[in-house]
Amino acid sequence: MSERGKEKERDYFLKILDIIEETVFVIDRDFRILDLSKGCLNKFRTHIEREEVIGKRCYEGLWGSEEVCEGCPVSSVFEKGEAARTEWSLSPSNGTNIYFDIEWIPVFDEHGEVTRVIGDIRDVTHRKEAEEKLAKIVDGVNIPAFAINSEHKITHWNTAVESLTELKREEAVGTDKQWLPFYLEKRPVMADLIVDKAQESEIKARYGDKYKKSSLIEGAYEALDFFPTLGEEGKWLLFTAAPLRGSNGDVVGAIETLQDLTERKNAEEQSRTIFEHVRTPLCLIEEDETITSVNKEFETLSGYSREEAVGKKWTEFVALEDLKRVIEYHHNWKKEELPCFGFKFVDREGNTKDVRVCIEPIPGGKIKVASITDLTKLKREEELCAICEELKELDDMKKNFLNAAYHELRSPLTPIVGYASLLKCDELGDKQRDYVSNIEKYAEQLRAQINRMLELARIDGGEMEMTMEDVPIPEIVNEVVKSFKPLWNDKEQTITTHVPEGIEVRGDKQKITAIFTNLISNAIKYTYEGGRINIMAVDRGGDIRVCVSDTGIGIPEKHLPKIFERFYMVNTSLTRKSESLGLGLSIIREYVKLHGGRIWATSEHGKGSKFFFTLPKTGK
Amino acid sequence: MRKNRILIVEDAPYMREMIIEMLNHAQDRYEVVGFAINGKEAIEKYRELKPDLVTMDLVMEEMDGIQAIRKIKQEDPNALILVITAMDTPENRTMAMDAGADGYLWKPFTINNLLDVLEEMFGKD
């Protein structure tokens, strides 16, 4: 290019520098200013001409300093050919600080050498002031708060957020750890989403229905969520994030405040639990009488599900005949203190119930809570209670009566038995002797029966005493079998026993003997002539299990569950012949139970029965 | 041979009669010297008659048998007392024995039951 061409070029260049608003300057390796834009001239020093400055070192020419600025990167930019950035402040005489940020851009020649460096100055005083103001706000409030910049780095982390999160300011500022106290994995917090100008759909995806748009701050969102990692048992936080905007309106960061609502939430949760589980029907009603919430008891009382009940006016549950009165009451209440009143409550089925309702305002809101007492239910419960008491009395009376009756029944037996024995002392014919024997035999049966009734009465009265000892089972089985020998011999029955030697249980010997006596005598009684009876005992470790089986008439299946009940008698031709009133089995069931064992039976009608019982070895 | 003198303490007349009838069958050994219808009367009769043996019912008005046994035994530790009762529970038996009864007979009983128990009681002496 010719000299003239160069000149022209330079004019053109200077024109541009005059017109543009940017404050730029060009320096060489010695910091000497080669060119500068007009905006540069009055930026730092007033009334200065371009010619005065060109050729001077930048620190002299631009801000009248005699030394290279601290941290100046210019030499390094020349060396390495990489751009650099610095941020400096100046305190001119008028007292207001000027903050500026310079970007140092290298200019290369055809050999790739850096020949000049352009300094691009940007006044950041406004931003700086805003940041300082923000710092004052964030650090000054006692609400936990932090701020991040456009690069998601934490710029502010106040004392309150320090104590809420236990993350120290030194560890937080300058990093992107804003997620750390709240989440287990790295993820954007609300402030990050604001900085990214996230779409609402993205916020919704993150927070579901826990978020809402702030009604106070443009572009801000708030959300309520539970953070299990905070504190000892987690915390409920209401957090609000708002954008920070630069002078041109761009989002340059975000501030987020956090409010610890744990206590309030817990109290709410408690109230909700009480509301739900209290045994009183409750509903919340709005000023216009609409029901907004009901509890489980209300559902039971009304027959309506929660969803059905909510939205109805509570007066819809008042029977027509009471409606006028109830509305009057309600009207009066609006003026003065109020009370509880009764009315007929109509449930879903149209049934009416007498109830009493108390409507009380919930402090701090327009909602009232109505608690209902179901008088009908109350009355029914009272009646049931009374009936229960009566039944108890009746049962006591029955027990006393039976006890007395058994004793009275037994008294005349004494002279019957006594005089019959006296009669036999006299000279009697064979016939008369037979008659007396019959009297004695049936008197004995009567005595045994009455004794069984008395035994049951004593068991019912809880008067049964157990005399515990080590009871040898084989000996008892042998004794009982032997005692019935005349009977089974007569019927030509075979009795076999399989009882291991040495089995013992801790129990009441008399009662255990009675159990065997009853089962074995029944087996003999209900088995045909020539039948077989087997008694088997098995040692099962903790207890023994005994089985008395026979080849007798058996018990129809429908009777099996009831044979241990009192006075239950299986109606067969054989049983009609028998003398038992069916008390024997109920007594031995009680005996087995007193020992902590159980008793049951299986049977095949016509083929025989098996009676099983268990006795714990250690006794009860 | 001297007959053993017996005092019957029993509130039911038919029981008194029956016991007398039974003892009549052993007239050579036993003689009924009197009867009482409650515990209080039993003590008075015992002091008055000094019988060899007392048959004692347990359930009576005024004073029950147990109290009467205790009192009689306290005054005369050598007294022989046979309890005749329908209340045949182990507790009653223990209570009677603790009070000092020497024999026990359950109702109902036959003449043989009565004579056997008496023979046994006098045999012990």
Image (cartoon, rainbow, N blue to C red):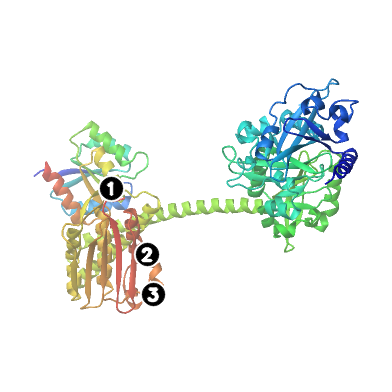
**Mark 3 Cα shell of 10 Å, populated few (<14), some (14-19), many (≥20):** few
Marks 3 and 2 belong to one chain: yes
Position of A499 relative to A66 (above/below): below
Tell me which residue sits at (85%, 30%) in the image: A43
Is circle 1 on the same chain as circle 3? no
Gap in angstroms between the C-alphas marked 1 and 2: 26 Å
A435 horizontally vs A501: left or right: right
Q: Foreground residue, A434 or A18?
A: A18
Upstream in sequence: badge 3 or badge 2: 3
- Which amino acid type corresponds to the residue marked 3 in the rendered image? Glu
Q: Amino acid at mark 2?
A: Phe
Specify the amino acid type for callout 1: Pro
Q: Residues within 10 Å of mark 1 (few under 14, many from 20)?
A: few
Q: Is residue B120 visible?
A: yes
> Which chain is disc 3 placed on?
A
- Comparing marks 1 and 2, which lies closer to the viewer? 2
The answer for which chain carries disc 2 is A
Image quadrant where one finds the C terminus of chain B: top left
| Number of the label disc, if any, that sits on residue A557 | 3
In the image, which disc is placed on residue B90?
A: 1
Residue at disc 2, secondary structure: loop
**Left/right of residue A170 with respect to residue A450 in the rendered view:** right
Q: Nearer the viewer, mark 1 or mark 3?
A: 3
Left/right of residue A178 with respect to residue A249 in the rendered view? left
Q: Is residue A53 above or below residue A114?
A: above
Q: Residue A78 appears at what percent x and percent y?
A: 69, 36
Instruction: Say whether mark 2 and mark 1 are on the same chain.
Output: no
The residue identified by callout 2 is A564
Instruction: Give the structural element (helix, strand or loop) at label 3.
Output: helix
Q: Is residue A518 above or below residue B52?
A: below
**Residue A125 location, x and y as percent?**
81, 31
Real-space Cα distance between discs 1 and 3? 39 Å
